[in-house]
Image (cartoon, rainbow, N blue to C red):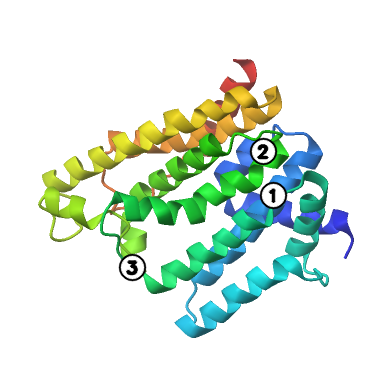
Amino acid sequence: MSVDAAYDEVSRITRREAKNFAYGIMVLPRDKRRAIAAIYAYARRVDDVADGPEPAEAKRAALEELRAALDADPAGDPVFVALADARARFGIPHEPLAALVEGGLQDLEQQTYADFAELRGYCEKVAGAVGLACLPVYGSDDTAHAETLGIALQLINIIRDVDEDRQLGRVYLPQDELTRFGINRLELSPEFRELMAFQAQRARAHLAEGLELLASLDRRSALCVGTFAELYRSTLDRIEANGYDVFHGKTRLSTPAKLAVVARGVFR
């Protein structure tokens, strides 16, 4: 498989599976856009295995194969052909890509988190690592803010996906905070709304800190990162406006709303 064909495939995966990322990276130059798509496609494959229906042992073996494939011949797999080229072009390090697999393996072993410190460690693997992998593509070495931004986006995902994660047998809301707010079961209630407002405040604080990354980026990279951060912020705004009802349908932004976010960034 040619490198161009591989990049075409990871770009299709990104457009199909990662609407926020797809709208953010559209403002990047072609080589950077394709590299970010390659990173996303690899992360998506890890997620699909970890969240899939196969038995835990089969998923564990598949995740280990994905980690080993980082150091192997891509053998015609479009995700790995594109990722290998992107790593060579931009110096994307091995460690954050391997950390994504560690996060997937953790999902097989751990379904709850005692406190935020424990949850943050998980978020560093599944989301902070994405920020660190993308950082060389953007042309920055600000690892601290890139990791924090990735964690912020994951915290918003956790808020949005409470019900979906529960159906997978996972509760990412810290157990000590569930207890503090008097929550024995996940359902819409005044106590749940108070807890979610607390989670949203934390996500917004991480987002504000993570966005300090923009100061180290060139204009188009900053526009990209700022765009998908604003898309996540807008999602959180809608969840908040809906009284934190995350049990009756997943909160999604419409295509016009997403394009409006991109336009605001371009003309700012």
Q: Which residue is mark 3?
A: 111
Q: Which residue is mark 1?
A: 37
C-alpha distance separating marks 1 and 2: 8 Å
Q: Between 178 and 118, which is closer to the camera in this rendering?
A: 118
Q: Is residue 131 visible?
A: yes
Determine contact: label 1, label 2, CB under 8 Å: yes
Q: Quadrant of residue 101?
A: bottom right
Q: Is residue 51 visible?
A: no
Mark with earlier residue (1, 3): 1
C-alpha distance separating marks 2 and 3: 32 Å
Apparent side of residue 246 relative to residue 74 in the rendered image (left or right) = left
- Amino acid marked by disc 2: Ile
Residue 96, position in %: x, y? Answer: 60, 54
| Location of residue 261 with respect to 149 vertically, above or below | above
Residue at the right extreme, as displayed: 2
Q: Between 32 and 249, which is closer to the camera in this rendering?
A: 32
Quadrant where the N terminus lies?
bottom right
